Image (spheres, rainbow, N blue to C red):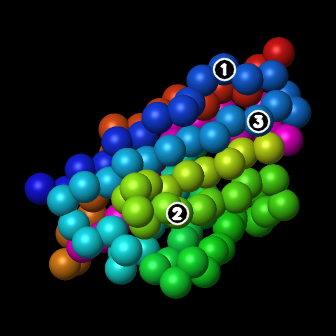
Amino acid sequence: QVQLVESGGGLVQPGGSLRLSCAASGFIFSIATMNWYRRAPGKERELVAVISSDGTTNYVDSVKGRFTISRDNAKSTIYLQMNSLKPEDTAVYYCHTQRRNLAYWGQGTQVTVSS
């Protein structure tokens, strides 16, 4: 079955960096579009970054120039490098993919940006 397991969250000061990872299994990773979402306290879930099978990336405007999504097909893993973090980046970050019209989510990893 499809499994997505995130790691790498934590507490970081404003201006700091974190790298999130999402290890995938149960499907042909190399052909899948993979996404990072986040849900901040009291807010709707937000699509943060997308990477397609050919490596094309897209970002929500609020993270452009600060976040980088990447993938390693040999490891069936995607990453989210987050630099210049701001308090408003505080959220639970989720890995997501869709296979055969079904959505799959990881368990989420908490990112807290605070001094």
Q: Is residue 49 visible?
A: yes
The residue type indicated by label 1 comes to Leu
Picture quarter with the C terminus: top right
| In this view, the mark in front (1 or 2) | 2
**Label 1 secondary element:** strand
Q: Is residue 93 magenta?
A: yes
Q: How many labels were placed on the picture?
A: 3
Q: Is residue 96 visible?
A: no
Picture quarter with the N terminus: bottom left
Residue 64 placement, left or right of 20: right
Q: Residue at x 57, y 78 (%)?
A: 55
12 shown above or below 39: above
Q: Which residue is mark 3?
A: 17
| In this view, the mark in front (1 or 3) | 3
* Residue 84: quarter of image: top right
Q: Check if mark 1's residue and mark 3's residue have beta carbons within 8 Å.
A: no
- State the separation of the CA atoms marked 2 and 3: 18 Å
Q: Which residue is mark 1?
A: 11
Q: Which residue is mark 2?
A: 71
Q: Position of residue 92 (x, y in %)?
A: 51, 36
